[in-house]
Amino acid sequence: MQKVDFIKMHGLGNDFVIIDKRSNNIAITEDLIKKISDRRTGAGCDQLITINNTNNLNADAEIEIFNPGGDRAEACGNGTRCVAKILFDEDLNKETLKIQSDAGILESKKIENNISVNMGLVKNSWDEIPLSKEINTMSIPIQIGGYSNGVAVNVGNPHVVFFGKSILDTDLESIGPKIENHEFFPKKTNVEIVEVINRQLILMRVWERGVGITLACGSGACAAVYAAWKKGLIENNAEVKLEKGSLHINIVNNESIMTGPAEISYRGS
């Protein structure tokens, strides 16, 4: 097997193995993804991301995102911010980047020690999420004890958000896979459970599609704030508190802008 250099990074514990293919066009196979993503025998990660050269004159680089099972993910907010940190470190004078992803071109900015990314328009119509049939996306009829009906949104990938109390006591390990694979979601879905603390602060836990429970999820934080704002529970600019820290989400003209830390854990091969 050829030598594969990588960078291990994370955004609030949501961790990634990043492979730079711009100068070394490594073949990314399902077998390689599974080996590297394995937390016992590989580097271990929530997603593997490649940085690629791009032919798009409006983008600085292109990324591809893979879940540990080898399937593609359309969008990953924390992963995009981690890649942006690598690119910003290469050019310290740059303050804005454009990164091509399966979810479109995502604009990233350096804000002091944090990295922001504009995840683009949040979509809320049933066919854009997508759902298997026309349902009121503000009231998805899936029952979780102590929670409201779900709110379905698309932030480059599908999410369903539930609001309740005592989210730390909720058995997300059991609930998550059932909702991810529910018949309402033909492309499966990410699942967020959320507790509103005040008009500018929410707590969130997440079950990521194709991954499981993760410590953080950037697109999930965007989905949660958008859903809470649409329901009139919070302002359009709010803090999302996760297990290892917070992301700040601002909804502007229905676009979600996420800001938070992106850190290099180590480099390896």
Image (spheres, rainbow, N blue to C red):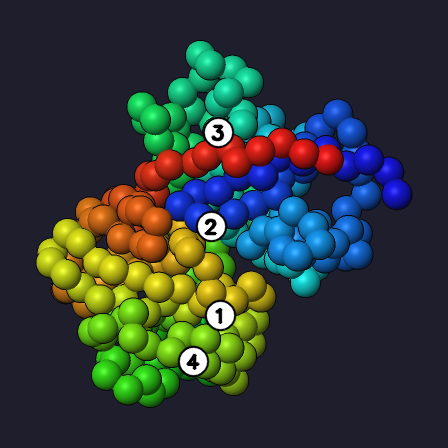
Residue 140 relative to residue 265: left or right: left
Mark sitting on residue 189: 1
Q: Residues within 10 Å of mark 2 (few under 14, many from 20)?
A: some
Marks 2/4: CA–CA distance: 20 Å
Q: Amino acid at mark 2?
A: Asn
Which residue, given by chain and number where applicable, does mark 2 sit on?
14
| Residue 23, x across and y down, in percent | 75, 25
| Residue 247, x across and y down, in percent | 31, 46
Please identify the residue farthest to the front as the structure is shown. Answer: 40
Which residue, given by chain and number where applicable, does mark 3 sit on?
85
Front residue of this view, candidates 138 and 247 = 247
Residue 142 relative to residue 99: left or right: left
Marks 1/4: CA–CA distance: 13 Å
Q: Amino acid at mark 1?
A: Thr
Marks 3/2: CA–CA distance: 15 Å
Front residue of this view, candidates 13 and 231 = 13
| Residue 5, x across and y down, in percent | 72, 33
Please identify the residue farthest to the left as the structure is shown. Answer: 198
Residue 238, placed above or below residue 153: above
Helix, strand or loop for disc 2: strand
Mark sitting on residue 175: 4
Marks 3/1: CA–CA distance: 28 Å
Q: Which sits earlier in the primary sequence, circle 1 or circle 2?
A: 2
